[in-house]
Image: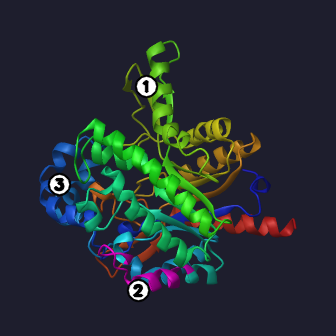
Amino acid sequence: MDPKLFPKDFLWGASTASHQVEGGTVNQWSEWELAHATELARTAAKRLSWLPNWRHVRTAAQEPENYVSGKAVDHYHRYEEDFDLLKDLHMNSFRFSIEWSRIQPKEGAWNAEAIRHYHRYIQALKKRHIEPILTIWHWTMPTWFAEKGGFEKTANLADFDCFVKKVAEEYGDDVRYVITLNEPNVYASFSYLTGEWPPQIKKPLTFFHVYHNLAKAHRRAYAILKQAHPRLQIGVAMNMANSQPKTTRNPFSVLFAYGSSYFWNRWFLNRIRKQQDFIGVNYYQTNYYHGFATRNPTTPVNDLGWYMEPEGILSVLTQIQAHYKKPVIITENGLADSKDRYRRWWLEQTLIAIQKAITQGVDVKGYLHWSLLDNFEWSYGWWPKFGLIAVDRDNGMKREMRPSTRWFGSFLGKLQTIQKRSE
């Protein structure tokens, strides 16, 4: 890598989501966890025994407590400690989400203390010269909103508008970057197509309706935010896969890889094309298609069984440049790797790919690793370890940097030194 290829104002950081790290949240997802933890534990072997590391995770995966977020990693109370770790890693940015259910626990009622908490939270970042990158919605919602049908009903978008207006009013002066929605493609698919997540509906027509409503929600949020604070840089964070044909000699493989790339990566972005200042990219996977089925290599894979091809992000970035010509922030990128065998390799190959993208004209503004902390990984629970920082939840929530993380922090420190010398 050539350090000089990274701009001096490049955003180096990590990402989290409120429900996954804060602890003590009460929303539609926490209610679902409590109702389904026993079932998820009972069916774990049926769902997960194909994993190459099943024998290492089966004990945790078969415990109901694994599927309850509970106290999480207590980031809600220990955020200053966690921000100090960001500084130790020479990071200058941090992505987080506002927990809607905290600041509006009941319809029409705002929680003043929760609102003040996020003011203190943002100021703690700025005091450390860390750029706050605020996500408005990262999949969780108040129970009252879910009971009304959530994003299934277009009329309910007025409730989301109200939340967005409150966020703009309270925090718009203190941030520059706002992400309205996190991975609307993933949420709509797993909640309304495969039925794995709450509300566990398997109806294609409902899926399309929710997906359309999320696009509307973003466009309306963009207008609200821009009217209140025109200087804000606003985008979405899209899960984007590198879809490739296993062989170009099979026309069905080529066709399906293209169709998958279009529908997964670009369908939503095309509908908000005029309402985005940057594109947030969450990249985890490359998928190879043989006909209409995926045929990925069997190694290397992460702890969730996902085939790992970190350099595949280059193809995603160049496609974004070709279709949208917008600045890009890599808002999530990482791997479940409890033994820390692959994380340094993943980071190195990813950063090399980002540099190649920059040399090819892609306006990459930043890289945010997922995640800063070991976190609650939705329907998988606690056993997948994505964190740069390991958290021992059985030993006082003790934080500890993984070896790959120390390497990454050292790299960023050297990068900063080189850039200062060149000024």
Circles 3, 2 touching at the beta carbon (< 8 Å): no
Q: Residues within 10 Å of mark 1 (few under 14, many from 20)?
A: many
Mark sitting earlier along the chain (3/2) = 3
Question: Is residue 183 highlighted in magenta?
Answer: no
Mark sitting earlier along the chain (1/3) = 3
Residue 128 picture location, percent across and down:
63, 81
Whether residue 296 is visible to the viewer of this picture, yes or no, is yes
Q: Which amino acid does label 3 sit on?
A: Leu
Say which element carries label 2.
Answer: helix
Q: Mark 2 points at which residue?
A: 112
Circles 1, 3 touching at the beta carbon (< 8 Å): no
Q: What residue type is labelled 2?
A: Ala
Question: Is residue 106 highlighted in magenta?
Answer: yes
Classified by dominant secondary structure, the portion drawn in magenta counts as helix
Q: Mark 1 points at which residue?
A: 289
Q: How many labels does the image show?
A: 3
Observer-nearest residue: 304 or 15? 15
- 242 relative position to 42: left or right: right
User: CA separation, marks 3 and 2?
Assistant: 36 Å
Q: Is residue 256 above or below residue 92?
A: above
Which of the labelled discs sits on residue 40, or is there none?
Answer: 3
The magenta stretch spans which residues?
103-122
